[in-house]
């Protein structure tokens, strides 16, 4: 529920569990599935990368040989695109610095509690180092796209107005509340925390120390919540609170909840000035996506590309 201001370039690029090899040497027993000039991907590497995708499928889909073959082919074509773009990165002598990679890792870690971040790798059958290596490739792909395509994008005032008018309805909102939240496992513990809050202790500090909710690391800040986003058992007592108010302990099947209303916002429409960055990012995304196909086709024509679809 927490609002996030990070908007990635919306292009046909690989998810984090994908990857490709920049190695030019392969075992004599291994077969090359993709070759883009001197960049190669072997069948062994393809199967290793695809395993993470297979693990994320539900059981019925994983058992369906036709679905899995379609997924393997789709993944193969994605890898071809990625390797073409990485070949362009070679030409441009681009790389991802250690600082850029570390910052990207921290950005992902922020969206998970520590144990949840570790569980992600267990679930996807991938090591942290392998995930980090593939993240680096994804960042490099995005860097090439920004340099090659985003630099050509210009935005006029009329385009900003047209985009605002087009999306105004979906950006309009009903009554909203920005709230902090503490989730506790037992009623006794919840009552103790509520007593401390009523005694003047800081809500954000207690949330960081004791809450089990994902937003605990943000001091319990859930961002803005509209009616209909929460179960009725939580929505009604939350929206009944005054700004600055703290709720009593609320029991649900998930545990015991305490809320604090930071701000209340009446229903309304955002002003265009409030949406400028969102509008620019949206227009950039549309223009880059429109140019992506022809740009990739030009790259395809300049490289020696071999794809062995029958091997997969």
Image (cartoon, rainbow, N blue to C red):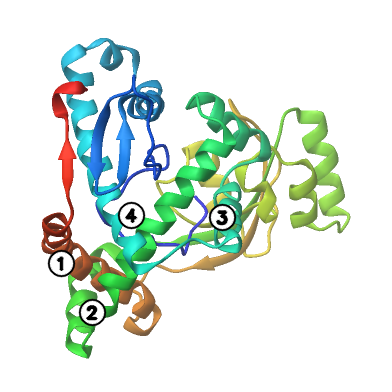
Of the residues under marks 4 and 1, which one precedes in the sequence? 4
User: Where residue 216 sits in the image (x, y, percent)?
Assistant: 68, 47
Do residues under tags 2 and 1 come within 8 Å of each other at their CB atoms? Answer: yes
Q: Is residue 33 depicted above or below 300 in this figure?
A: above
Whether tag 3 and tag 2 are in contact, CB under 8 A, the answer is: no
In front: mark 3 or mark 2? 2
What residue is shown with label 1?
A: 291
Element assignment for label 4: helix
Of circles 4 and 3, the one toward us is 4
Decide: marks 1, 3 in contact (CB < 8 A)? Answer: no
Q: Would you name the residue on which mark 2 appears? A: 152
**What residue is pinned by disc 3?**
107
Residue 75 in sight here: no
Task: Tell me how far mark 2 sits from mark 4, CA to CA.
Answer: 20 Å
Q: Secondary structure at mark 1?
A: helix
Q: Residue at x 40, y 79 (%)?
A: 274
Q: Going by the image, does 269 lie left or right of 6?
A: left
Residue 136 percent location from the top left of the image = 48, 51
| The disc label shown at residue 207, or none | none
Quadrant location of residue 59? top left
Residue at image coords 22%, 12%: 64
Between the C-alphas of marks 2 and 1, the distance is 10 Å
Q: Disc 4 to disc 3, how far (Cα)?
A: 23 Å
Q: Is residue 40 visible?
A: yes
């Amino acid at each position: 529920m927490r609002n996030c201001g990070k908007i990635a370039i919306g292009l046909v690029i690989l998810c984090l569990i994908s990857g490709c090899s920049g190695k030019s040497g392969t075992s004599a027993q291994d077969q090359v599935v993709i070759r883009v000039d001197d960049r190669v991907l072997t069948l062994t590497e393809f199967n290793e990368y695809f395993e993470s995708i297979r693990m994320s499928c539900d059981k019925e889909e994983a058992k369906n040989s036709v679905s899995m073959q379609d997924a393997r082919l789709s993944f193969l074509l994605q890898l071809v695109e990625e390797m073409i773009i990485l070949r362009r990165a070679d030409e441009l002598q681009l790389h991802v610095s250690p600082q850029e990679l570390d910052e990207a890792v921290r950005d992902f870690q922020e969206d998970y509690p520590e144990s949840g971040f570790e569980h992600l790798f267990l679930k996807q059958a991938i090591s942290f180092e392998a995930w980090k290596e593939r993240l680096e490739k994804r960042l490099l792909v995005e860097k090439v796209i920004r340099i090659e395509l985003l630099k050509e994008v210009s935005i006029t005032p009329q385009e900003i107005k047209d985009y605002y008018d087009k999306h105004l309805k979906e950006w309009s909102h009903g009554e909203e509340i920005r709230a902090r939240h503490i989730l506790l496992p037992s009623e006794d513990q919840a009552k103790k925390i509520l007593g401390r809050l009523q005694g003047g202790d800081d809500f954000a500090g207690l949330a960081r120390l004791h809450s089990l909710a994902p937003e605990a690391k943000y001091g319990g800040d859930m961002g803005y919540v509209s009616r209909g986003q929460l179960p009725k058992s939580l929505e009604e007592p939350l929206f009944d609170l005054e700004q600055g108010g703290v709720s009593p302990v609320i029991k649900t099947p998930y545990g015991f909840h305490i809320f604090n209303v930071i701000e209340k916002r009446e229903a309304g429409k955002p002003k265009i000035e409030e949406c400028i960055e969102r509008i620019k990012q949206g227009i950039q995304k549309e223009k880059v996506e429109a140019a992506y196909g022809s740009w990739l086709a030009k790259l395809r024509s300049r490289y020696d590309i071999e794809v062995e679809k029958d091997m997969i």
